[in-house]
Image: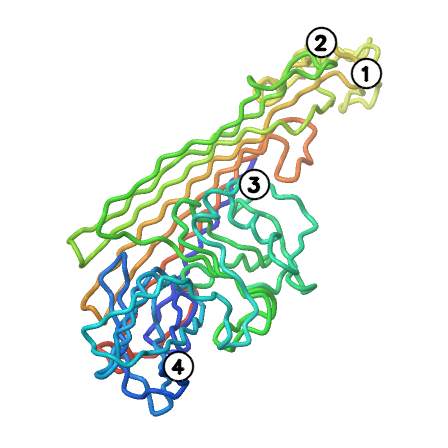
Amino acid sequence: MGNLKAVLLLGVFSAALPAQTFNTGTFLGTITDTSGAAISGVAILVQRIDQPLQREAITDDLGNFQIPQLPSGSYRIEFSKTGFQKVVRPDVDLNAGQSLRIDTSLTVGTVAESVEVDSKVAQVDTATANVGSTIFGTQVQELALNTRSFTQLMTLQPGVNSAQAQQPGFGSNTSVPFSFNGGQTSSNNWTLDGGRNIDTYNGNNLSMVNLDAIAEVRIERNAYSAEYGRNSGGQVNVVTKSGTNEFHGTLFEFFRNDKLDARNFFAASRPKNRYNNFGGTVGGPIVKNKPFFFLSNEYRRIYQNTGVRTSIVPTDAQIAGNFAGGRTITDPTTGRPYPGNVIPSQQIDPNAVALIQTYYARPTPGFSQGNLNYTSSEPDGTKFRAALARVDYNISPNLQLFARYNIDSTRLLSPYGLFSTNPMPLCCRFRTISHHAAVERLAELGDQPFSGEPDHGGFL
């Protein structure tokens, strides 16, 4: 019987740098007139729809503009210049790690005249060589996932393969390795809100997040730029949700129960298999347009039968010292066999009897298979919890700060040992705890109220 406890604390603190694109995206493009000539000095206003965040830019002599460091979300974009009609794009979606080109044409007119463009912007990244994709929060939450783990969606991406089936497991509650484009399964870089989130023992994702708390999952599979770094395989970043000016919440429970299963025709009873996965989220404003909060809790209670095992346990007669019919028992003081193969009661240590009575289960009545006389089928148990708290603070329209803390803990009950090596259900209990924290500020370029070198991840 054992008790294993692992505690991990991981933090990431980021300053506003153009290269820090794990959680942010970039708008860029070229503004021209109807003849195709570049227009300089066009004012561009970018406003986030669900939170009060805005950025401004002006096109250069070649009509080009670039607005980096934008958190993922939906935006309203205005293009205006004296002598031209204003162009408005009311709903443009930007993903983490994305460089989205928005080339726009202005028509001669007055700024008071406004043209609203409803057509969707092509989501193809033509600005960088990155080969990747985004799994949106609605996909994460609505696609059928057997284990309620976002990692199941990895194999839906081109070039991603795994030789193991998805199973809830030890520690991170996911023990499945993935190969991106034929690379080693230990070469991937898993991040949570841009902070390193890797089980260094096997290279798998470590801290888990409730699916209802995921805004999106950004996957870079190949040819990504240098800021991702660390590992040569796939880059997977999970972006958590934030609160908005409206209160939103979810409640859920998914369950399986052996009471609903059909009994095997040849089995006397149904093995115990229970799966309960429940929790919820809530988010909203602390003060309208300023600080926002988002909270998430998820629990799992799993009991899974691992099969029937047979072994040998002492009978009542043997505990009393009677080994008649069995192997010969010799007296350690004389070296001679006991008469009738029976140990005298005065030579039996009462402490040994108490130990056997306490820790050895009794033989199954009537069971006999050669020397085997005991059968058991105790289920493995898992108690898992993932909790997340996030605060976003709009200090000004051009400056945003967020802080997020995530903890998951797993308690395993393994009656036959961690790798099921014991023939009898005598142990074991294991526990792992993972802590993950991130703090990041997003500021318009040129606005540097904070100082200090950024640390893109590390152990504290």
* SS at circle 2: helix
Q: CA distance from mark 3 to mark 1?
A: 34 Å
Residue 109: which quarter of the image? Answer: bottom left
In this view of the protein, which residue sits in the foreground, 176 or 117?
A: 117
Q: Is residue 415 shown above or below 174?
A: above
CB under 8 Å between discs 1 and 2:
no
Disc 3 marks which residue?
168
- The percent coordinates of residue 268 (x first, y second) are 69, 11
Q: Which quadrant would the N terminus be assigned to in this image?
A: top right
Judge depth for marks 4 and 3 and give the one in front: 4
In the rendered view, would you say 255 is above or below 299?
Answer: above
Residue at the disc numbered 4: 30
Name the foreground residue: 455 vs 107: 107
Query: Is residue 127 rendered to the left or right of residue 398?
Result: right
Examine the rendered structure and indicate whether residue 319 appears above or below residue 285: above
Label 1 secondary element: loop
Which amino acid type corresponds to the residue marked 2 in the rendered image?
Ala
Q: Amino acid at mark 1?
A: Gln
Task: Give the CA distance from mark 4 to mark 2.
Answer: 91 Å
